[in-house]
Image (cartoon, helix red, strand yellow):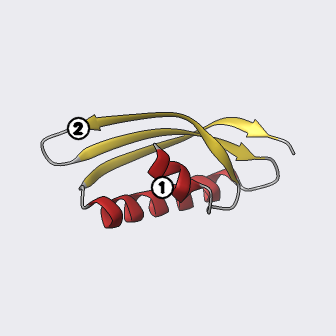
Amino acid sequence: LDLLRIIIEDIPGVHNIVNFKSEKTTYGVILSIGLAVLYGYNAQDVLFSSQQTVGKLIEEYTSITVVAINIKAQRLINL
């Protein structure tokens, strides 16, 4: 979870992680992440870039195969 927080804090439009769940499979890991998205950003773009960035960096930093990443916007934050 700490590694995810470090990765997510550099993505524009993401405030923080609301919930996180991981599931181990025979071929790798499935990540389910709920994010708090900032008001004023395009949610689809933010979630897509989050999915791409998290998948790439988790595999790069840990050498764990990421089978799927399910990312949802669960909160909208207006700062």
Query: Mark 2 — residue?
Result: 24
59 sits left or right of 34 in the view: left
Which residue appears at 54% of the width and 49% of the height?
Answer: 5
Amino acid tagged 2: Lys
**Marks 2 and 1, how far apart in space?**
18 Å
Name which quarter of the figure residue 55 lies in.
Answer: bottom left
Q: What is the quadrant of the N terminus in the image?
A: top left
Q: Secondary structure at mark 2?
A: strand
Q: Is residue 30 left or right of residue 15?
A: left
Left or right placement of residue 17 versus residue 30 in this view: right
Residue 34 pos. (x, y %): 55, 37
Q: Nearer the viewer, residue 29 or 5?
A: 5
Rendering coords of residue 47 (x, y %): 58, 52
Give the mark nearer the N terminus: 2 vs 1: 2
**Measured from the top left, where is residue 72 in percent x and y?**
55, 39
Labelled disc at residue 51: 1
Which residue: 49% across, 40% down? 33
Furthest residue to the left?
26
Q: Residues within 10 Å of mark 1 (few under 14, many from 20)?
A: some
The mark tally for this picture is: 2
Label 2 Cα crowd, 10 Å radius (few <14 / some 14-19 / many 20+): few
Q: Position of residue 67 (x, y in %)?
A: 27, 50
